[in-house]
Image (cartoon, rainbow, N blue to C red):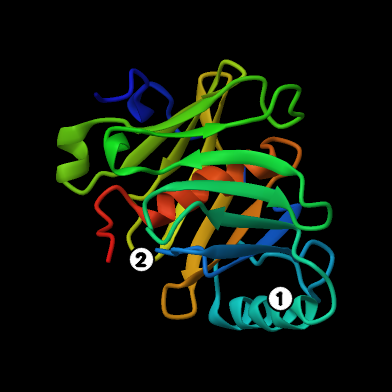
């Protein structure tokens, strides 16, 4: 079923720009069957996000991620419950091993995918459902996915072409950019930048991973 919210109801706020306060490198997070590692690069890069994903900045982020992986555990890990790509995946704290959330990406969830959180989670008080906005628009190439957290709609916008997608938060009846992601490294890794004041990092990472793996992904 299409999502009840439409991006047409929330025009983009052209006066705001992304305030990228956090950077994450998602290692092997695209079409993965076993484990993806999320490396926190916040404060580890020489330069802040330049406003778009340039090859030089992305290369520096990838190099920094490799260096950090060799010396410390990742910020989060996402593990599959089996050898299938589309399955239940569990995100854990890379330092403590504690469960952070669960991603339902099974074959029976073609219409929507869900992120479930443990009781008392600081990341969300309720389950989050990521669903396509409009089936006809998706077939026409106008791809938007929507989810709601604490009564606020968010949209992942994949209409810009190329490897990047934009995360919008609806504020004052307008869409404001709060995150951006792009695939990297032969489309197996990705780099996520976000405004940590406007979107929870776990929610952004979990929904981005669902987005990257796609509804039309084939398990093989």
Q: Position of residue 215 (x, y in %)?
A: 29, 47
Q: Position of residue 68 (x, y in %)?
A: 79, 76
Disc 1, SS: helix
Circle 2 residue: 162
Q: What is the number of the mark on residue 183?
A: none
Q: Nearer the viewer, residue 42 or 10?
A: 42
Question: In the image as oriented, which residue stretches furthest toward the front?
Answer: 82
Q: Residue at x 43, y 29 (%)?
A: 11
Q: Residue at x 55, y 75 (%)?
A: 54
Q: Is residue 18 visible?
A: no
Q: Residues within 10 Å of mark 1 (few under 14, many from 20)?
A: many
Disc 2, SS: loop
Q: Nearer the viewer, residue 217 or 13?
A: 217
Displayed quadrant of residue 79: bottom right
Q: Quadrant of the image for the C terminus?
A: bottom left
Circle 1 residue: 65
Q: Nearer the viewer, residue 149 or 48?
A: 149
Query: How many angstroms separate mark 1 from mark 2 (CA)?
Result: 23 Å
């Amino acid at each position: 079923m299409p999502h009840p919210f439409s991006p047409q109801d929330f025009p983009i706020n052209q006066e705001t720009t992304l305030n990228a306060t956090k950077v994450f490198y998602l290692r092997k997070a695209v079409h993965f069957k076993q484990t993806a590692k999320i490396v926190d690069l916040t404060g580890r890069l020489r330069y802040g996000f330049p406003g778009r994903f340039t090859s030089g900045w992305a290369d520096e982020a990838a190099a920094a991620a490799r260096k950090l992986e060799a010396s410390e555990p990742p910020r989060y890990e996402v593990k599959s419950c089996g050898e299938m790509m589309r399955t239940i995946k569990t995100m854990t704290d890379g330092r403590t091993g504690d469960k952070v959330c669960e991603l339902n990406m099974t074959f029976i969830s073609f219409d929507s995918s869900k992120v479930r959180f443990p009781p008392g989670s600081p990341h969300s008080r309720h389950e989050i459902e990521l669903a396509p906005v409009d089936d006809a628009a998706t077939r026409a190439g106008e791809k938007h996915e929507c989810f709601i957290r604490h009564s606020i709609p968010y949209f992942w916008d994949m209409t810009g072409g190329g490897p990047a997608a934009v995360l919008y938060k609806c504020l004052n009846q307008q869409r404001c950019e709060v995150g951006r992601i792009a695939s990297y490294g032969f489309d197996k890794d990705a780099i996520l930048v976000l405004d940590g004041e406007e979107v929870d990092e776990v929610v952004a990472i979990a929904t981005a991973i669902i987005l990257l793996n796609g509804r039309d992904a084939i398990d093989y």
